Image (cartoon, coloured by chain):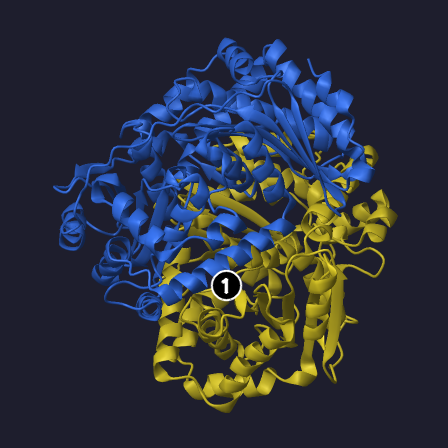
Amino acid sequence: MTAIQRILCRVSVASLLTLIPAGQQAMAGRLTVHEFTLTNGLKVLLVEEPKAPVVTVQIWYKVGSRNEVMGRAGLSHMLEHMMFKGTPKYGKGVFSKIIETADKLELALEMEADRMKGLLLDEKEFKLEREVVKEERRLRVEDVPMAYLVEQMNAQAFMVHPYHWPIIGWFSDLDAMTREDLKAYYETHYVPNNATLVIVGDVKPETALPLIKTYFEGIPQGSPPPPPSIVEPEQKGERRIVVKRDAQLPFLYFGYKVPNFKSSDVHALAVLENILSTGKSARLYDALVYRKKLALQVGAGYNELAADPELFTFYATVKPAVRIAAVERAVLAEIDRLKKEPPTDHELQKAKNQVEARYLFEQDSVFRQAMLLGTAETVGAGWQYVADYVDKLRGITKEDVHRVAKKYLNEDTRTVGILIPLPSRSDRADAMGGAR
Amino acid sequence: MIRAALLIAALVCDGVLSGASHAAEIKPTRVVTENGMTVLIVDQPFLPIVTVNVLVKAGAVYDPDAKAGLSNMVAEMLDEGTKTRSATQIAEQIEFLGGELAAEGGEDSATARLRILRKDADIGFTLLADILMNPKFDPKEVARVRDELVGSLQSEKDEPSIIATKAFNELVFKGHPYRRPANGDEKTVTKLSRQDLVEFHDKFYRPNRAIMAIVGDLREAEALALVKKHFGGWTPQELPLPAFPAPEPLPKPTLKLIDKDLTQATLVLGHVGIDRRNPDFYAVAVMNYILGGGGFSSRLVRRIRDEQGLAYDVGSVFEANVMPGSFAVHVQTRNAAANQVLASVFQELKRIRTEPVGDQELADAKAYLIGSFPLRLDTTAKLASLLNLVELHGLGLSYFDEYPKAIAAVTKEDVLRVAQKYLNPDHYALVVVAKLAEAKIDANVVSTTK
């Protein structure tokens, strides 16, 4: 993983509880998922994967930035931190400690069930943890020029929808947050009928299900949480944001409005992303890093497994002494090329081979497998989306890729973020020239 | 290796559990080929995939001072063209199959990694052997990659933890190759020539310096046939190796302040630690888990994060390398809290050196290290990396059975003894990267630590 991918990841994967997971998805074929729903509405997904003596247990709650309101950005993430601060049964610190020493499925289930209903949310602990979250924000955003730009760009791309604000929240919202905010949020969203329990590993459904029932069935169903209703209005014209700050190299990050999993165009968009961005033979690396020598790193990203539509993004770190405008032109040239003519048969086949191989590689890790299923289920795509993915992708044609490039990668829905380093006068002049 | 424990802590917190009782099931086969390459094989037929890691004893420790970054650049150049394939052809061939092929440098060694579907194993081995044995170092590609490496060195100056670690290593490894960053610096990398790369490769990339780990859907005989077919022609060559003098100990606590416009102070504090073959490794692993290695439950985390809300990330690491690596405490806190955090770090270092740890603390640490061991082996990639290290450090194939036993045998007395032996309150370096006007580091904190 490159430094840039790490930063982009950091920004979006700050919490398992959010609805904006990072990474690419690929699975299909012989995936066997056992699905159960308890009487209180808790959904259970279980995959038997006996290849190693390990099992991953994840509970996904359908709540994230998307459910927050203006002035309380970061509430979901803050609550995730508080989930480790104890219940009447298991005090502060025990969740971290016990989980680290657990070697039994039953204990993990018991503890997850325990914190689904009786979280302490102690006032003193909350105030300390708020300071920890502010340190996390300083560490991951404030002192990281590229991450800072990514945050600013998202705020520009989404004006109305809560994707406007970062998962970790703004400082002033964190300061304004109260224990009562957290308590109300917890009681509304942390109910069994708003959650999915995902278990993948060396476990049999007939042993796990009775245990799951023992610990979770007694938790009362809650009222269905109110569905967020905010819709981002159509963007009518390119938006640009410039950040000037202490940094070494210019950085370009831009994105187009694209649909999420609900659209039939998603698989063509995924192939498009692959052709542009997967590996050194992909178009962006080949053009910008290898042939034109303009960028240190370049890539594209598309995450269709988001509850509401996100962006199809592009990033590039500019090589020393290169103008950022030249880099932007070169990325746009690659986009235009795909709008002018379809990819080659060879490129299409390569993208499909890559997706199929990745599907198998991902199964190597029970944790990754559970993450994928949990994400798909939580954002509303359903785990079947994962199971059907490779088959759907096999059906994509060159013309499909060409069509979606023309349909979505258009200037009027583009938001461009540019980082201009300010260490010295000469760098400043260069980058400013590039920004014009 | 102890660093690995920290990573596992993060994973386990995400909810991966393991059954320790199965840990003993890893039974690698070890073969030394006719041309001297050590091959370790674990047949795992669960998925039709194959992971191959080739570790070559060709790390940054062998770089001449004036050519720091040479070994790293050689590793970076491996997949940038061979005598019969261009950089573009290599990328195209492996990526068309959905496979992955990459190489990276390191302190003690460089590693080339292959991940491929079983059906494509032959072409995967072909490419892996080609990049290891026949890199071309085409002048055009050399110039491009050198520019990229210099560019990324510049980019690293945006990362406070890298700035701090580089300054820290320079202080604690005086007179020793570990003081240099494996990727060199802008001055030395700029001057690296094609000739330097060719010579380094010819000298160090030899089968008798290579350890190959093959994990996945290949029977032993299949794996060995592939090794013979593709690596049989690699010529061994003995190489007299330089002896490295021990780093000069710091005469007194040494403080280095670096001013940067940041909201947080990054602190790195420590000194030289242990090598991986040190018999106290396991006691140190337990001690460090309790002090600062133990994910969310270490003393440093409790004290600085949980009780004072002063940091998101705080921990301590022993880099147990071929030669003694560093012991370091790492923490980031808002500038104004730097002195308060430092005081807490010193108190915890003193406490673990003067008081025996609690029974429960010891039991928890051992239970975690033993219980999480299978999580270090649960993917083909993780297992291949660990196999490379087991062989590099000469730990023996019984390692997979021995590790839990060695941890279980650690006592409270051992923990106290190794804390006193390997944590040194008189000879440490402290690096602070911060907005110094706000951090106002109190030199007294440093000089009155005993």
Query: Residue visible at 73% across and 48% down?
Result: A137
Q: Chain of mark 1?
A: A
Q: Give chain A's shade.
A: yellow
- The percent position of residue B94, horizontal first and vertical second, equals 32, 65
Left or right: A212 with respect to A86?
left
Q: Whole-percent x and y of residue A63?
A: 69, 57
Q: Secondary structure at mark 1?
A: loop
Frontmost residue, B59 versus B362: B59
* Visual hue assigned to chain B: blue
- The front one of B125 and A302 is B125
Whether residue B156 is visible here, answered yes or no, is yes
Q: On the rendered image, what quadrant is the C terminus of chain B found in?
A: top right
Q: Where is residue B396, by image quadrant?
A: top left
Q: Is residue A104 visible?
A: no
In depth, the one of A168 and B230 nearer the eye is: B230
Q: Residue furthest toward the right?
A: A176
B391 sits left or right of A101 in the view? left
Looking at the image, which residue sits at the far bottom? A340
Q: Residue at x 60, y 83 (%)?
A: A408
> Which of the image's four quarters has the N terminus of chain B?
top left
Q: Amino acid at mark 1?
A: Gln
Can you identify the residue that label 1 sits on? A24
Of residue B132 and residue B125, the one placed in the foreground of this image is: B132
Where is residue B253, by image quadrant?
top right
Residue under the image location 67 percent in, 78 percent down: A414
Q: Residues within 10 Å of mark 1 (few under 14, many from 20)?
A: some
Q: Position of residue B209 (x, y in %)?
A: 26, 40
Give the tally of numbered discs.
Answer: 1
Q: Is residue B53 left or right of residue B276?
A: left
